[in-house]
């Protein structure tokens, strides 16, 4: 299972907080029933375009990996949770929204693996997109 989340509205302060990202990556695998292989790594990126700076973090888990990329000046972040173990993608998304105080999120789930009988089966069942609007801790599909 691969969960991809685009998050909006967390605010530049949270998105620039390396300790918040590191703590999230340290605790999140346990909340999903997964096992960390190494401590989380968080790095600051500064490129040629000043507003593109942000934090990139990841943690390797026995089941695969979790990554976070923030863009404080754009009030945007993205997170990927890739696992060979099934997990509750709605609960995982809600945990991200709560931790970072997201106002809105979009998420995609992709079933990945070798069990698809044909390329057509893979295409028909692989990706579904959901848009979530969150206000004061609640979420609704939109």
Image: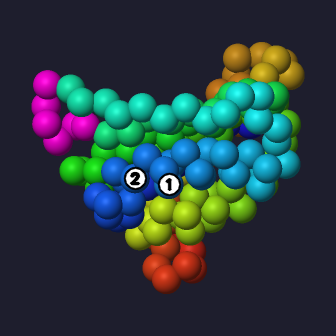
Question: Element at badge 2?
Answer: loop
Q: Is residue 127 something one can see in this rendering?
A: no
Q: Is residue 49 magenta?
A: yes
Here the colouring is: rainbow
Give 114 or 52, whichever is nearer the viewer. 52
Q: Is residue 22 magenta?
A: no
Question: Element at badge 1?
Answer: helix
Q: CA distance from mark 1 to mark 2?
A: 5 Å
Residue in the image at 85% along x and 48% along y? 33
The answer to whether 105 is drawn above or below residue 120 in the figure is: below
Disc 1, disc 2: CB below 8 Å? yes
The answer to whether 14 is drawn above or below residue 42 in the figure is: below
User: Would you name the residue on which mark 2 appears?
Assistant: 17
Residue 38: x percent and y percent?
71, 28
Q: Is residue 15 something one can see in this rendering?
A: yes
- Quarter of the image for residue 41 reads top right
Residue 49: x percent and y percent?
13, 31
- Quarter of the image for residue 115 reads top right
Residue in the image at 55% along x and 79% along y? 137
Q: Residues within 10 Å of mark 1 (few under 14, many from 20)?
A: some
Residue 111: x percent and y percent?
73, 34
Residue 117: x percent and y percent?
84, 18
On the rendered structure, is 51 left or right of 123? Answer: left
Residue bounds of the magenta highlight: 48-53
Label placed on residue 20: 1
Q: Residues within 10 Å of mark 2 (few under 14, many from 20)?
A: some
């Amino acid at each position: 299972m691969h969960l991809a989340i685009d998050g909006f509205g967390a605010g530049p302060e949270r998105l620039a907080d390396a300790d918040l990202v590191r703590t999230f990556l340290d605790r999140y695998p346990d909340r999903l029933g997964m096992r960390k292989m190494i401590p989380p790594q968080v790095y600051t990126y500064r490129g040629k375009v000043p507003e593109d700076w942000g934090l990139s973090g990841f943690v390797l888990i026995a089941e695969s990996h979790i990554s976070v990329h923030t863009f404080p000046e754009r009030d945007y972040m993205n997170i990927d949770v890739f696992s060979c173990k099934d997990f509750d993608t709605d609960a995982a998304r809600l945990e991200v929204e709560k931790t970072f105080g997201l106002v809105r999120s979009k998420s995609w789930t992709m079933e990945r693996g070798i069990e698809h009988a044909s390329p057509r089966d893979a295409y028909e069942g692989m990706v579904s997109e959901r848009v979530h609007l969150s206000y004061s801790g609640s979420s609704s599909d939109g």
